[in-house]
Image (spheres, rainbow, N blue to C red):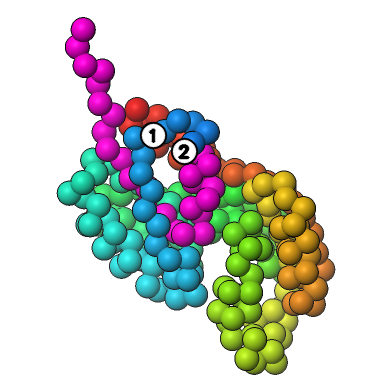
């Protein structure tokens, strides 16, 4: 009997905010041939740095991996990430941001104006609210900036990936801290799971 064909070595280069969810999808689908490399989630506070950070990660991965997928949406780069990916020959997750692909691109777009004044949290952001939002935006030092950042929002929408009462309460507390109404939508992994599974099957 001959050896079983070897799956090509594959890597997902991801935003650190998606690490837990991507690993869960990989495990659930037994995509053992995929490795995960994460860039710091704090890059989202400086989105102009995301494209070149992703380019560097792609170039570092190329000698070792045959297939590369980028687990970022546009993430506030204004199309700059797509220009880098076109130059590097890599594909990314669909949509403008993680709120869209978690919700499902079509479902998110269908809400349109209904969400124009919504500030979104995911499971990751609910866990890291103090670090990324309060401290990251300097609200711990300058609480008067709250209105500058959040004055045009009406609602904090928690898009949960998992059913977790503690995270829901953290998100509710975050809404209260920002002076916003609270809404919870359980969306699961949405298009993130679909895209990771598709990438894994093509390399299996």
Please give left or right for residue 160 compared with residue 181 in the image.
left
Q: Is residue 119 above or below residue 66?
A: below
Picture quadrant where residue 125 is located: bottom right
Q: Is residue 167 above or below residue 27?
A: below
Start and end of the magenta stretch?
A: 1-26
Q: Which residue is mark 2?
A: 26
Name the residue nearer the viewer: 107 or 193.
193
Residue 168 placed where, x, y %?
75, 57
Q: Secondary structure at mark 2?
A: helix
Please give left or right for residue 7 compared with residue 151 in the image.
left
Q: Secondary structure at mark 1?
A: loop
Does the image show residue 83?
no
Q: Is residue 36 above or below residue 204?
A: below
Locate the N terminus and report the quarter of the image it occupies: top left
Residue 146 placed where, x, y %?
69, 85
Name the residue nearer the viewer: 180 or 166.
166
Q: CA distance from mark 1 to mark 2?
A: 7 Å
- Asked if the stretch drawn in magenta spans residue 125, the answer is no
* Mark 1 Cα-neighbour bin, 10 Å: few <14, some 14–19, many ≥20: few
> Do residues under tags 1 and 2 come within 8 Å of each other at their CB atoms?
yes
Residue at screen point 36% across, 58% down:
82
- Asked if the stretch drawn in magenta spans residue 7, the answer is yes
Checking the image for residue 32, the label placed there is: 1
Residue 122 placed where, x, y %?
63, 58
Residue at screen point 26% across, 33% down:
8
Please give left or right for residue 189 compared with residue 94 in the image.
right
Picture quadrant where residue 204 is located: top left
Q: Farthest residue in the top direction?
A: 1
């Amino acid at each position: 009997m001959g050896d079983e064909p070897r799956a090509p070595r594959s890597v997902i280069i991801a935003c650190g905010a998606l690490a837990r969810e991507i690993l869960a999808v990989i495990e659930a689908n037994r995509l053992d041939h995929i490795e995960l490399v994460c860039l710091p989630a704090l890059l989202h506070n400086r989105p102009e740095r995301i494209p070149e950070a992703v380019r560097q990660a792609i170039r570092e991965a190329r000698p070792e991996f045959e297939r590369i997928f980028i687990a970022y949406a546009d993430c506030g780069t204004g199309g700059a990430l797509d220009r880098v990916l076109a130059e590097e020959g890599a594909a990314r997750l669909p949509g403008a941001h993680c709120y869209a692909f978690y919700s499902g691109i079509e479902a998110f777009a269908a809400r349109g104006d209904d969400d124009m004044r919504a500030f979104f949290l995911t499971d990751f952001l609910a866990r890291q609210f103090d670090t990324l939002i309060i401290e990251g935006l300097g609200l711990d030092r300058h609480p008067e900036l709250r209105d500058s950042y959040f004055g045009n929002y009406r609602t904090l929408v928690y898009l949960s990936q998992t059913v977790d009462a503690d995270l829901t309460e953290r998100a509710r507390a975050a809404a209260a801290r920002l002076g916003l109404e609270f809404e919870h939508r359980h969306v699961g992994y949405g298009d993130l799971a679909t895209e990771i599974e598709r990438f894994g099957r093509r390399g299996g």
